[in-house]
Image (cartoon, rainbow, N blue to C red):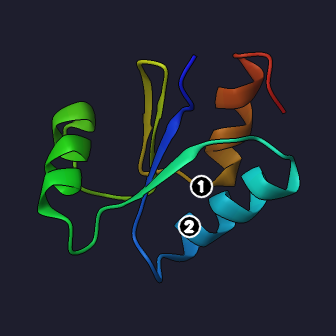
């Protein structure tokens, strides 16, 4: 199974917090930087209907514009974290 995708923007404090949280808990994701990457930004917007980061695609389930407080219950529902 492929890794979940985490769309981020450099310098975004919520993105940095989520990346640190995932790294600390050894939860592997494929990180995609959308800033300066029109095709990645379009992919994220098509997926989530919005342009804010972080946005996560967890095997077809999308969590958009979130922080760690929203990520924890999202992961727990999937048996992670």
In the rendered image, the quadrant that contains the C terminus is top right
Question: Which residue is farthest bottom?
Answer: 11
User: Image quadrant of residue 29?
Assistant: top right
In the rendered image, the quadrant that contains the N terminus is top right
* Mark 2 vs mark 1, CA separation in Å: 5 Å
Where residue 19 appears, as percent x and y from the top left, is 65, 60
Identify the element where label 2 is drawn: helix
Residue at 70% in and 29% down: 75
Where residue 51 appears, as percent x and y from the top left, is 23, 55
In the displayed structure, 36 sits above or below 68; it is below
Residue at 56% in and 67% down: 14
User: Image quadrant of residue 53?
Assistant: bottom left
- Res 43 label: none
In the displayed structure, 18 sits above or below 78; it is below
User: Image quadrant of residue 77?
Assistant: top right
Identify the element where label 1 is drawn: loop
Report which residue position mark 1 lands on: 67
- Front residue of this view, candidates 71 and 37: 37
Report which residue position mark 2 lands on: 14
Where residue 7 appears, as percent x and y from the top left, is 41, 52
Where residue 66 appears, as percent x and y from the top left, is 51, 50
In the displayed structure, 1 sits above or below 16; it is above
Residue at 48% in and 20% down: 59
**13 displayed left or right of 27:** left
Circles 2, 1 touching at the beta carbon (< 8 Å): yes
**21 displayed left or right of 53:** right
Q: Is disc 1 surrounded by few (<14), some (14 to 19) or many (20+) residues within 10 Å? A: some
């Amino acid at each position: 199974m492929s890794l979940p995708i985490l769309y981020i923007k450099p310098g975004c404090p919520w993105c940095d917090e989520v990346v640190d949280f995932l790294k600390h808990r050894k939860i592997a994701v494929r990180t995609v930087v959308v800033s300066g990457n029109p095709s990645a930004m379009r992919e994220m917007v098509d997926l989530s209907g919005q342009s804010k980061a972080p946005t996560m695609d967890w095997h077809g389930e999308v969590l958009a514009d979130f922080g760690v407080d929203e990520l924890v219950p999202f992961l727990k529902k999937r048996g992670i974290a």
